[in-house]
Amino acid sequence: MLDWDVVSDPSSIAEYQIEVERAPLGVNWQPIEQSPWTGVSATELEIEVECGWHHRWRVRAVDGAGNAGPYSDWFVFLLPVA
């Protein structure tokens, strides 16, 4: 489960965009299948990723006027092989 802090903007928040990278190379960021995510009433999202790899993710908000903010710092997680 990915979760992040609420972002506020005078024009409202239209969506959150989440990217995931399987290996921390800094050049292979991919939008997740559910992104852009428009359910702004909550700030968490469950995603599916490949087991046995290190992953990292980041999120940014897009305001009601269509302006995308900067991506957050990235966060690392590992899914062991089950």
Image (cartoon, grey):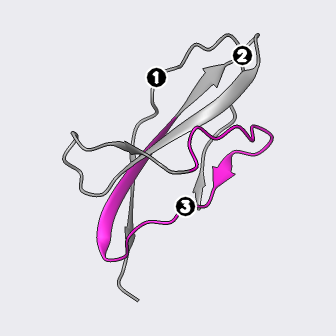
Q: Quadrant of residue 46?
A: bottom right
The structure residue drawn at horizontal position 69% and vertical position 45%, both measured from the top left corner, is 43
Give above or below for 43 relative to 17.
below
Dot 1: element: loop
Identify the disc placed on residue 64. Answer: 2
Identify the disc placed on residue 59. Answer: none
Q: Which is more foreground, mark 3 or mark 1?
A: 3
Q: Is residue 45 visible?
A: yes
User: Which residue is tagged 3?
Assistant: 47
- Amino acid residing under circle 2: Gly
Q: Which residues are magenta?
A: 34-59
Q: Quadrant of residue 13?
A: top right
How far, Cα to Cα, is label 3 from label 1?
21 Å
The structure residue drawn at horizontal position 25% and vertical position 44%, both measured from the top left corner, is 28
The structure residue drawn at horizontal position 21% and vertical position 39%, both measured from the top left corner, is 27
In the rendered image, the quadrant that contains the N terminus is bottom right
- Amino acid residing under circle 3: Ile
Residue 53, magenta (yes or no): yes
The crowding category of the residue bearing disc 3, from other C-alpha atoms within 10 Å (few below 14, some 14 to 19, many at least 20), is few
How far, Cα to Cα, is label 1 from label 2?
15 Å
How far, Cα to Cα, is label 2 from label 3?
25 Å
